[in-house]
Image: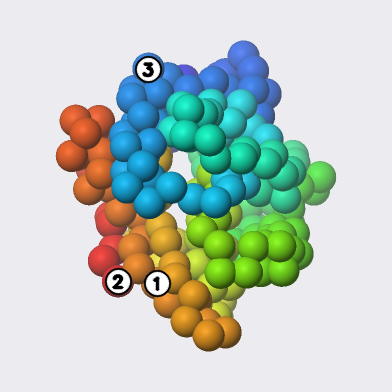
Amino acid sequence: MTAQAAEAGGAEVIEIPERDADVPLSDLGREQARAVGEHLAERPPDVAIVSPYLRTRQTAELALGDKGVPLVVDERLRDRELGILDLLTGRGVQARLPDEARRRSRLGKFYYRPPGGESWADVLLRLRALLREVREDHPGGRVVFFAHEATVMLVRYLAERLDEQALMAIAHRTTIANCSISSWRREGDLLVPEAFNAVEHLHREGAPPTKQEDVNAEPV
């Protein structure tokens, strides 16, 4: 059961047998990954930095495995850790952990840290360190990240120097599509946005975006 199906069905728990880090790509996910590869073939990156999660590594391997691009697995790109909330839907948190639901509502998504997990601010700490290394190790290079929804949002926060309110407004109206592309180019000391949550390459290759009705791609 996917998270979307569990939420839509009113379930309290997302029933998957594997750890989240061990969930493999679906057949559609593999098709989408190949579409990303066709898009990146037009301008191959110098290096790919990849989350250690299985589905993310599989995406990178399918997209770039035969193109001679070095793939570097870096745990700082892993998804946000949910701790005690792991596998619970919104309904499940309300029913089973009402005190945490109230604390999350009071603190907001940016600063709320579930017991044993991370806030978005925590994830930013590891992403800042990673981006600093990328600037030092690949000055002027073309680097691609294979990561997750929260990390895409937070890279945008860092790249465009947003504040909490601007980030939350984007997060509220946007669902990151599987195998969508967000990109920035360097101009001096700034990163200038080129695309955010773009899915045109998936349509072009006949690999429809997952849950298109939930995707609100935002042009920049």
Report the residue marked by disc 1: 193
Q: Earlier in the sequence, mark 3 or mark 1?
A: 3
Task: Out of 209 and 46, give the one closest to the viewer.
Answer: 46
On residue 48, the disc is none
Task: Out of 6 and 143, give the one closest to the viewer.
Answer: 143
Neighbour tally class for label 2: few under 14, some 14-19, many 20 plus, Cα within 10 Å = few
Tags 1 and 2 in contact by the CB under 8 Å rule?
yes
Q: Residue at x 35, y 68 (%)?
A: 194
Question: Mark 3 or mark 1: which is in front?
Answer: 1
State the image quarter where residue 50 is shown: top right
User: Considering only vertical position in the picture, is 163 above or below 40?
Assistant: below
Report the residue marked by disc 2: 220
Instruction: Where is residue 132? Give x, y as percent.
Output: 71, 69
Neighbour tally class for label 1: few under 14, some 14-19, many 20 plus, Cα within 10 Å = some
Instruction: Where is residue 97? Give x, y as percent.
Output: 68, 42
Q: How is the image coloured?
A: rainbow
Q: Residue at x 54, y 73 (%)?
A: 159
Is 77 on the left or on the right of 144, as rendered? right
C-alpha span from label 1 to label 2: 7 Å
Q: Residue at x 38, y 45 (%)?
A: 40
Report the residue marked by disc 3: 27
